[in-house]
Amino acid sequence: DAKTTQPPSMDCAEGRAANLPCNHSTISGNEYVYWYRQIHSQGPQYIIHGLKNNETNEMASLIITEDRKSSTLILPHATLRDTAVYYCIVRETSGSRLTFGEGTQLTVNP
Amino acid sequence: NAGVTQTPKFQVLKTGQSMTLQCAQDMNHNSMYWYRQDPGMGLRLIYYSASEGTTDKGEVPNGYNVSRLNKREFSLRLESAAPSQTSVYFCASTKQGPGELFFGEGSRLTVL
């Protein structure tokens, strides 16, 4: 699986959009980009994934650059409950080895 | 559906003791995983099982053994626990092909 690079921490004001970047410059053509988050010491929670096109669901939007070497997770209206560690990983369609980096600690401030 | 169930949720061991962490999923997933998470750190892959009957080492396999008992169950064994194995252990599973990874609630292990 390709390695990912994320900033260790970010801050965001409540009600504003939170934009979390991820670099995956060695991603291959059949690897998906996945985002998870972990609140306190709970099990990580799936947010969204994509291959080439931008994706949106009820939680977030995922913007993948045309060359697929980086992506951005967007939380459109961040709330205090969005304070968490956010992990970006890449995974082959049929790949099984899944490793997580250190993620980004997002702190949403009132 | 229960999803991914881990037992026990909490355990305290003395150095040198052995124990097995159990994990079961009811989603008919092919792949299962064991991760550990130390305080303030990310998740590190210990072992994984791509399908029933197969297991592979992850990033930090030393001191652990695993068994994929059947498609539903994937256990993690500590043969001789050490204080360095104090951590929160997460089991996860996923289907083949694109799809999310489902996590259990975690098992908090303290080795004295």
Image: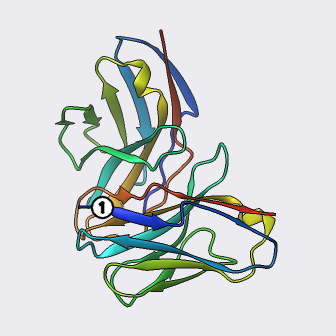
The image quarter containing residue B103 is: bottom left
Given residues B81 and B58, the one toward you in this image is B81
Given residues A9 and A80, the one toward you in this image is A80
Number of marks in the image?
1
Say left or right for B10 vs B80.
Answer: left
Q: Residue at the location (32% across, 27% down)?
A: A74
From where the camera sits, is residue A110 visible?
yes
- Give residue B25's position: percent from left, percent from top: 32, 70
- Amino acid type, mark 1: Gly
Q: Residue at the location (64% across, 78% down)?
A: B19
Return the residue found at the far bottom: B53
- Give residue A77's position: percent from left, percent from top: 30, 17
On screen, residue B33 above or below A63? below
Q: Which residue is mark 1?
A: B3
Given residues B34 and A4, the one toward you in this image is B34
The image quarter containing residue B89 is: bottom right
- Give residue A70's position: percent from left, percent from top: 37, 40
Q: Quadrant of the C terminus of chain B?
A: bottom right
Say left or right for A78 vs B44.
Answer: left
The image quarter containing residue B16 is: bottom right
- Give residue B67's position: percent from left, percent from top: 48, 86
Check disc 1: other Cα within 10 Å, few if <14, some if 14-19, many if 20+.
Answer: some
